[in-house]
Image (spheres, grey):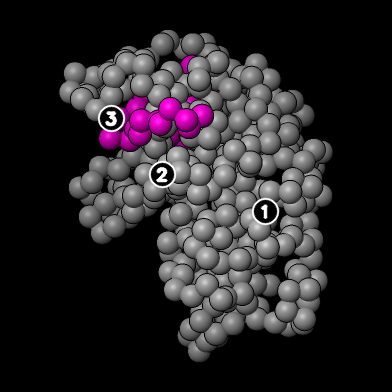
Amino acid sequence: MLVLKYHQAWDVRTQQVEALSCIEPDDVVVDIAVCGICGTDVGIITGSYPVAVPGTTLGHETAGIVAQIGSSVTQFQVGDRVVINPTYSCGHCRMCETGNPNHCEDKFGTEAGVSYDGAFAGQYLAKENLLIKLDAHVSMEEASLTEPLSCTLTGVDKLGITHTNIRAVVAGAGPMGMLYIWALYERGVKAFMVEKNESRIQFAKNNLPPECRLYSDFDEALIQEYGDKSTLIDLCVDTTGQLTEYIFDHLAPGGKLLNVALKDKHATLDIMKIADKSLSVIGSIDSLNNSFDRAYAMIRDGVIPVSRLVSHVFDFEDYEQAFLTVGCDLAAKKQVPLSTPNCKVLIRMSHLK
């Protein structure tokens, strides 16, 4: 089968490998239908997130059809449509036992598509307990957003939202920013969004939740929303990783800053202010506290309209164009400005439905 392999920064190419088969009793081989491009993939390719193991097949936002099951598998049959949780956890190490299974000490590195083979491939080797059977009305494309939405729910959980009449902002209108603003809306919080990139703006402005507004400048947003650029805000989700110091200086007492960007960037923060103003600076990654199952349920029930966030679907043979659409020019080996309105870009690995 054909897969997309990472070898080193900017050295990403397709190659033929052997078809997969079950090894352990709880293994399940899944024929892949679609797989989404994540910011993690772009960070790995560009070298800005240098954690991937050379020789690894990329891709982790995925869904497909069961092709083979191990001897102990009882919950799935060949032919079942499934969505795949790529974040392994053993359930027994100290991290798992203290409520942080996304940082499991017994897994190799991080997750599928980073430390072991992922789903930009014809097949993926999964574990029975990391699969969810798809309802008939849920498309493969919609299901593939379960993983990024589950990461979003993990972050929203960490915010501990107890009031809805708060001043809230999401920085960045990429796929994660759009998922966050919808997830906050589902919790009753009407955040505004700040985004400078015109291609992101063009897509986002037509796909925001009701009454949520979009701005290209943070100061202007504060003026338009509250009448004064010095207004303090209660909650900010920063998906860009570029605004920590600015946002920190604009937090109201009790304010919370959630960073979900994997960026190699440093910030200077006033430690006294953190204590004196009861501020929280929070990081979040991966699925946690059953967020994967909850994310699928929200997609299944139409709570979060993820189909609206899929801007492009490319066939696997056009993977270079798919990555170029998100600003990752594999041929030129450089990042380039976005040239078309876009949000979540998927690669169709097969024509399975």
Q: Quadrant of residue 327?
A: top right
- Which one is in front in this view, the residue at disc 3 or the one at disc 2? 2
Task: Report the residue marked by disc 3.
Answer: 128
Badge 3: few (under 14), some or many (20 or more) residues near its Cα, within 10 Å?
many
- Say what secondary structure mark 3 lies in: helix
Q: Does residue 64 show up magenta in the picture? A: no
Q: CA distance from mark 3 to mark 1?
A: 36 Å
Q: CA distance from mark 3 to mark 2?
A: 18 Å
Task: Report the residue marked by disc 2.
Answer: 297
Q: What residue appears at the point 67 percent right and 53 percent down from the top-left corner? A: 208
Q: Quadrant of residue 38?
A: top right
* For marks 3 and 2 on the same chain, the one whose residue lies earlier in the sequence: 3
Task: Report the residue marked by disc 1.
Answer: 208
In terms of secondary structure, what is the magenta stretch mainly?
A: loop
Badge 1: few (under 14), some or many (20 or more) residues near its Cα, within 10 Å?
many
Q: What residue appears at the point 34 percent right and 39 percent down from the top-left corner? A: 88
> Which amino acid lies under the numbered mark 2 shown in the image of this protein?
Ala
Relative to 91, say whether 76 is above or below. Answer: above
Q: CA distance from mark 2 to mark 1?
A: 21 Å
- Which one is in front in this view, the residue at disc 3 or the one at disc 1? 1
Pointers 2 and 1 in contact (C-beta within 8 Å): no
Badge 2: few (under 14), some or many (20 or more) residues near its Cα, within 10 Å?
some
Q: Which residues are magenta?
A: 110-139
- Of residues 210 and 95, the one nearer the viewer is 210
